[in-house]
Image (cartoon, grey):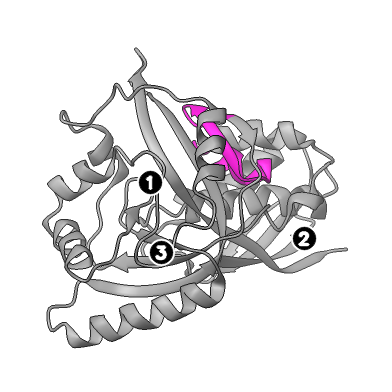
Amino acid sequence: MTTLYDVPAPAKINLFLHVTGRRRDGYHQLQTVFRFIGLYDYLDFERRSDGVIYREGTAVQGLAADDDLVVRAARALQAATGTRYGASIHYRKTIPAGGGLGGGSSNAASTLIALNRLWRTGLSRRQLQEIGASLGADVPVFIFGDAAFAQGTGDQLQALSLPEAAYVVIQPYASISTGQVFSAPDLTRNSKPVTITVFTDWLHANAGKSAGTTPRYFGRNNLEPIALQLDAGLAKTSRWLVSQGINARMTGSGSCFFVECRSLNQALAHQQEILVKINRYTDAVVKQVWACPGLHEHPLKCWVN
């Protein structure tokens, strides 16, 4: 095997996100639940014998290859294993950059998983997660492979079994940097920690009660009010969603919002309702809307021992 085509890299959403503290080194302590969703980037890999990592095409406009997490992930795997192989990598993006959907981290994780297979380097899931952690805080959960209750800096992961659900993902035109949100002095940094049992008990108590425009969400996203405070465009999008009766939550530090639905059919219907409302609204605030199934596990989970 010398090539791998159409390797998926799914997006994630944060079902809630609580900031519970801040360490002396500046890193924030978090609690969140990660869920993968059926919105994908796709990557192609061709093994090279010369050790070169070559990114073909312009995957992200204006992003230098040396700064690309995909290239950095491939080089990190080379350094960790001493393999003589390289790779030509081409990928096609759908997940928007800066959307809070983990696109860059997911691409890096799929690169580590795929090249571990293509190069026959034989690293375990834990070893790949350790490499992933050096690239970004969200990379390990994509290698972990399951929906997860996460603590610490997002590195302490417990697998979760989540109910069937689908999501409408709403991308505004506006965006904001993660660093800007986390550095804001008004950010709540003392949310009371919860246990995984508190979350799962809430899930069971609220099973089947979400219905399109009136979903129920656990806890809150502490980053959302800060993002809305700092960026007028995001605040305007949020106000528009509320004015249309759409109960959406921001994922990560933004900029994307999501609405939970019971089924993909319900999400598709709700997507069309939102698109109609967008077309009737003359001042554009929403760039794109997707309807996506919630995934129970990462599509490449079985590629790693």
Q: Residue at x 55, y 50 (%)?
A: 35
Q: Residue at x 23, y 40 (%)?
A: 180
Tell me which label, 1 or 3, sits earlier in the chain.
3
Q: CA distance from mark 2 to mark 1?
A: 34 Å
Tell me which label, 2 or 1, sits earlier in the chain.
2
Residue 96 disc label = 3
- Kindly report which numbered mark, 2 or 1, lies closer to the viewer in this rendering: 1
- Kindly report which numbered mark, 3 or 2, lies closer to the viewer in this rendering: 3
Q: Give the structural element (helix, strand or loop) at label 1.
A: loop
Magenta extent: 135-156
Dot 2 amino acid type? Arg
Residue 128 is situated, as x and y percent measured from the top left of the image, at 70, 37
Residue 253 is situated, as x and y percent measured from the top left of the image, at 32, 46
Nearer-the-camera pick, 152 or 41: 152
Q: Residue at x 21, y 71 (%)?
A: 244
Q: CA distance from mark 3 to mark 2?
A: 27 Å
Q: Is residue 155 magenta?
A: yes
Query: What is the number of callouts on the image?
Result: 3
Residue 21 is situated, as x and y percent measured from the top left of the image, at 34, 20
Residue identifier under label 2: 47
Residue 252 disc label = 1
Classify mark 2: residues with Cα within 10 Å, few (<14), some (14-19) or many (20+).
many
| Among the 4 quarters of the image, the one containing residue 18 | top left
